[in-house]
Image (spheres, grey):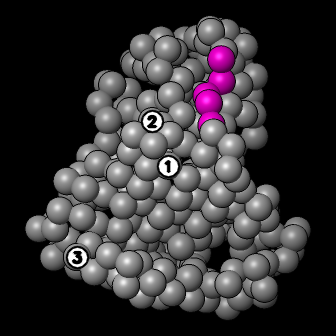
Amino acid sequence: MALPFFRAGAKTAARLWYKDRSSPVTEADIALDTFLKGHLATLLPEAAWLSEETADDPIRLGKRLVWIVDPIDGTRAFSTGHPDWCVSIGLIMEGRPILGAIYAPIHDRLYEASLGGGAWCNGLQLQVSEEAALKHARVAGPKPLVERFERRAGPIVHLPKVPSLALRLARVADGSIDVGLVSSSSHDWDIAAADLILHEAGALLTDFGGSTPTYNKPQPRHHEMVAVASRLHPRAIGAMRT
């Protein structure tokens, strides 16, 4: 549904406007949001809904199950012709994800996970990087956080920032990024699906204090975070603590 509007290396063919003065949204975001809301409600009528592109309904706070969706994560990338954008769908039960799916159409990569069922990409089981040390780790994220990490952890490999946060985290799960850093501007819909995919691939997503995110709270916003293989997690959060 989004692909007809995408123009590689060029401005999208979709109508584009801005919410909150700086956050872009396109007609493709809205079309996908409308489709997914209707389709997922049919699959699981008892689940509530939380999406970046739908007005928040506080009824979700009393629900055990909630779909948490970003119809296009990385709208700015999508709208400028960058390939790193995706559709992110998570199902939350009592504050934690039990299903997660991320699809990157330009790369044709479908990441998916169920609680206890492993993480997969295009039918192949995912496993995080086997990197055993932070030194020379491949790190992606906002420049200030990456530089802060390097000051504490030593020399690293700076990877380009992946504009879609969900896709950045999925690439930690598939082993192509060792450490994914997350700014304090992330929301439930950016990370819920990726959180489970990471967990099932052998990684952790936590804040710098080591706490895992809780979803479907009144304010669905999160602090700075790190995604990294479980074995490197203590050293990674240690490097980010001030």
Q: Which residue is mark 3?
A: 46
Mark 1 vs mark 2: give the one in front: 1
Give SS at disc 2. helix
Q: Which residues are magenta?
A: 126-130
**241 and 7: which is toward the camera:** 7
> Which amino acid, by three-letter code, is at mark 1?
Ala
- Distance CA(mark 3)–CA(mark 1): 21 Å
Q: Which residue is mark 2?
A: 199
Give the label on residue 65, or none.
none
Mark 1 and mark 2 lie on one chain; the one further toward the N terminus is 1
Image quadrant in which the C terminus is located: top left
**Horizontal relation, residue 191 to residue 60: left or right:** right
State yes or no: residue 174 in magenta.
no
Residue in view at x 55 percent, y 11 percent: 152
Q: Which residue is mark 1?
A: 113
Residue in view at x 63 percent, y 84 percent: 28
Q: What percent of the width, then of the height, locates residue 29?
A: 57, 80
> Which amino acid, by three-letter code, is at mark 2?
His
Give the quadrant of residue 6: bottom right
Mark 2 and mark 3 lie on one chain; the one further toward the N terminus is 3
